[in-house]
Image (spheres, grey):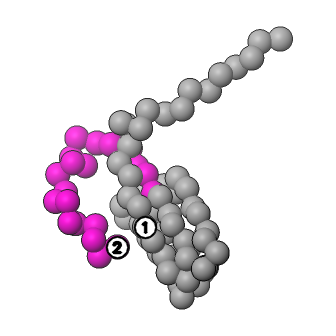
Amino acid sequence: MTSSTRSAPDEDEYDFLPLRLPREVSRVTAAMRLAIEAEFGGWELSRVRLYTDGSRRVLLRRKRTKTSGMLPPDATKGL
């Protein structure tokens, strides 16, 4: 029997977008917002952390493309 090893994807291949959702945001609203990000921005869910105060920290990722580095650094501040 052989063991198969899965190599983790290289983090240099992905762009990451951290989001912080306050506790006032319902689960349905959070799901809709993340679905919109996935649909129109090409993002996928990488990690969700739920804190004891009810807030959530979400990490989205997408494959890096040639044009993905062209956004100004503050383009995602309103998210």
In the picture as drawn, the residue positioned furthest to the right comes out as 1
Give the residue displayed 54% in from the left and 32% down from the top: 8
Dot 1 amino acid type: Leu
Instruction: Tell me which corner region of the image, top left, top right, bottom left or bottom right, holds residue 3.
Output: top right
Q: Is residue 29 visible?
A: no
Asked whether the beta carbons under mark 2 and mark 1 sit within 8 Å of each other, the answer is yes
Determine which residue is flagged by label 1.
19
Give the residue displayed 20% in from the left and 66% down from the top: 74
Q: Helix, strand or loop at disc 2?
A: loop
Determine which residue is flagged by label 2.
79
Q: Is residue 8 visible?
A: yes
Q: In which quarter of the image is the N terminus?
A: top right
Q: What stretch is highlighted in magenta?
A: 60-79
Give the residue displayed 54% in from the left and 88% down from the top: 24
Q: Is residue 71 toward the left or the right of residue 65 in the image?
A: left
Tell me, yes or no, whether the highlighted magenta stretch contains residue 74.
yes
Dot 2 amino acid type: Leu
Residue 6, given in percent of the width and then of the height, sits at 62, 27
Q: Main secondary structure of the magenta part?
A: loop
Residue 36, given in percent of the width and then of the height, sits at 44, 70
In the picture as drawn, the residue positioned furthest to the front comes out as 52
